[in-house]
Image (cartoon, helix red, strand yellow):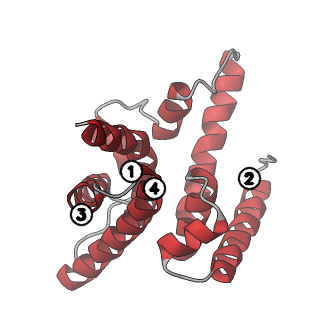
Amino acid sequence: MAADNDLSDFLQSVEKRAFKRTVYAVRDDEAALDIVQDAMIRLANRYADRPPAEWPMLFQRILSNATMDWFRHRKVKQAAEVNFSDIEARSGDPDFDLLEMLSTQNGSMGEESAAQSYERVQALLQIEQEVEKLPNRQREAFLMRYWEELDVAETASAMGCSEGSVKTHCSRAVHALAKALRARGISL
């Protein structure tokens, strides 16, 4: 029973980041939720008996594979693609912002004025838009390295590529984001 609780705790700890990463990849919140749930079920069914230290990498690999499977199925079915910005409209709350919600839960907002809060929200929206524009592999590498905080080896394993490819994808993503954000007047 303790293993079930450990697995449940692990899945709860990764679900929001996994959802965000998958939404960036597929640009469809319903499909992203299905993909994340499918990855969680696969981990629970196939790898629950593995040591908990192995779960993060296994989950990242399963999630990457599930995302690639979704793209293959979508290509075959010629499904329509939905923009990431539709999440706000579907949530029912016009002020819903997933990044803001996550930063609030992590306690990173702190005390700030209304103007600072507005500027931060606008900057996050612009960053989201620029991340969304990155090519798929660059976005995947960038999100795993900087959102999921995986190291280069873990990211390479999850993406099924070499460490050099991960470094190249991340470097290109960072340079593209920096250039795009500077053009928008944002300096980090």
- Say which residue appears at 48% left-offset and 31% top-offset: 101
Q: What is the number of the mark on residue 56? A: 4
Name the residue nearer the viewer: 170 or 8. Answer: 8
- Say which residue appears at 71% left-offset and 24% top-offset: 116
Distance of label 3 from label 1 (alpha carbons) = 21 Å
Distance of label 1 from label 4 (alpha carbons) = 15 Å
Q: Is the C-beta separation of discs 2 and 3 under 8 Å?
A: no
Decide which of tag 1 and tag 2 comes sooner along the chain.
1
- Kind of residue indicated by mark 1: Phe
Distance of label 4 from label 2 (alpha carbons) = 35 Å
- Residue 100 picture location, percent across and down: 53, 33
Q: Is the C-beta separation of discs 4 and 2 under 8 Å?
A: no
Decide which of tag 2 and tag 3 comes sooner along the chain.
3
Q: What is the number of the mark on residue 46? A: 3
Residue density around tag 2, few if under 14, some if 14–19, many if 20 or more, within 10 Å: few
Q: Give the residue at mark 2.
A: 184
The N terminus is located in which quarter?
top left
Distance of label 1 from label 2 (alpha carbons) = 27 Å
- Residue 24 picture location, percent across and down: 45, 59
Q: Is the C-beta separation of discs 3 and 4 under 8 Å?
A: no
- Say which residue appears at 57% left-offset and 44% top-offset: 125
- Kind of residue indicated by mark 3: Arg
Relative vertical location of residue 118 with respect to residue 53 in this rendering, above or below: above
Residue 135 in sight here: no
